[in-house]
Amino acid sequence: MIEARLKKRLGSLEIDASFSRPGPGVTALFGRSGAGKTSIVNMIAGVLRPDAGRVIVNDKTLFDSERRIDVPPEKRRIGYVFQDGRLFPHASVEKNLTYGMKLTPAGLRYVDLGQIVALLDLGHLLARRPGKLSGGEKQRVAIGRALLTSPRLLLMDEPLASLDAARKEEVLPFIARICREFEIPIIYVSHMIDEVSRLADKTVVIHNGKVDIEASRRIAGKDGPTSDSDKTDGSRERVC
Amino acid sequence: MDYLRFSPAELEALRLSFKVASVAVISSLPFGVLSAWIISRMTFPGKAVLNGIIHLPLVLPPVVTGYVLLVLLGRKGAIGAFLYDKLGLSFAFDWKGAALAAAVMSFPLMVRSIRLSFEAQDRGLEKAARTLGAGPVRVFFTVTLPLITPGIITGLILAFARGLGEFGATITLVSNVEGETRTLPLALYTLIQTPGGEDGAMRLCLLAVILSMAALAASEIITHRFLSRMEG
């Protein structure tokens, strides 16, 4: 469950966005570059402070300007896959993957290294340093690193934007696999309609910092037929 | 004359210089990192003043710096009297005073080099570490510090070379006592003042050139190695 209401003035851009989603599944934040999508996920992650608003994930209030709650990013348990990967260049792939996992109390972990390595096909990369990985490999490691913190919410900020079409196809199926295997809400930022339609079952269109359209919709997938329902569910029929 | 036949006094000066410069850079390093961090990452009123004070030894005549240290840290000085009464610590005519002079004089070089690394660093990596569950202190020691290592090494070596050659502030603060404060440049100065000291002076001159070149080369090699390890 996610509920976000965010206000922030950034130069000439006035962000004033709210959206919510019950239950797990992929919510896409869709819009042109410069619309404020990245700032919105930064505020959810806690690396950018909103001027006002509220962020609640799974009934846990992470930010509330009225109640003066501002949980620091390291305590939010939100996984964040950055557009540019942001792998630690001085550490091996394996050290990158386990960096956040080791900081997660054992009792809160729902996924282990072996599972992630198998899921994202990272076995042959573990000993290498991020510097020599291909773009697609880097993003898979970044996704794995975020998932290994066993987050209550996963943010993905244009994880495929820096990749060419072939590399995209290398990563997309893995992302689809993640939302099938883990019961966590995912916020997926993109300006590419094909990615959004392949992955998301709810789309929030952001325009000039505001929510333009908030629509829950199912897209034809192997799990079921196309249907256009209103914003509802949290039901189990996820298509991604 | 034989450029490799050092007299015991010259070797003593060399040994002392190494000791003074090493102690100077190692004990000032934590302060150097802290100052560089404050200057590059924080904004507060009076920051320009702090920056100015740190860089002052770079532009002041070294004798002035030495004299200020003497006034502050001499046994009757504002800070020196306290240190002597409470800790029995005295800098006058003592190698520790020479180390202090070298530390103060080389401090701006160290801070500059470390500060440049802080400023060149991708802050995004620190944010990524925060979202992975690391608090600010852990981020500093596991992400920031390892990534600025080349800058720290360069700063250390530059400061070491500067400390090795420190003359003006040293002779003003702790005078020129053989075996205690007569470092390589002071020994060189003494030899130049002594009739018949030319051979010794030339030997120490060459030694100074070789040591400085070696320090620069070491800095280059270590930085290069570090960067290539990061890429591969």
Image: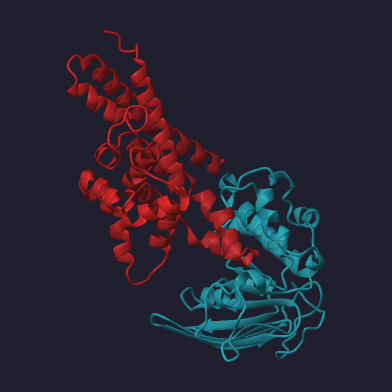
Residue A221 location in percent, x, y?
76, 73
Left/right placement of residue A125 relative to residue B23 reads right
Q: Residue at x 46, y 75 (%)?
A: A34
Whether residue A194 is visible? no
Q: Indicate whether A23 appears above or below B72.
A: below
Q: Colour of chain A?
A: cyan
| Residue extending farthest front | B85
Let me know if residue B6 appears in the view: yes
**Percent x, y of residue B117:** 42, 51
Relative image position of residue B138 (x, y in whole percent)? 60, 59
A167 shown above or below A219: above
Quadrant in the rendering for residue A19? bottom right
* Residue at screen point 28% across, 32% down: B176
Q: Colour of chain B?
A: red
Residue situated in front as seen by the camera: B145 or A179:
B145
Image side of residue A111 versus residue A203, left or right: right
Depth check: give the residue in front, A203 or B135: B135
Q: Is residue A69 above or below residue B22?
A: below
Display colour scheme = by chain
Q: Residue at x 81, y 78 (%)?
A: A224
Residue B11 found in image quarter: top left
The front one of A111 and B13 is B13
Is the residue B66 above or below the residue B52 in the image?
above
- Residue nearer the viewer, B207 or A59: B207
Residue A186, image x, y percentages: 69, 73
Q: Does residue A175 appear left or right of residue B207 in this picture?
A: right
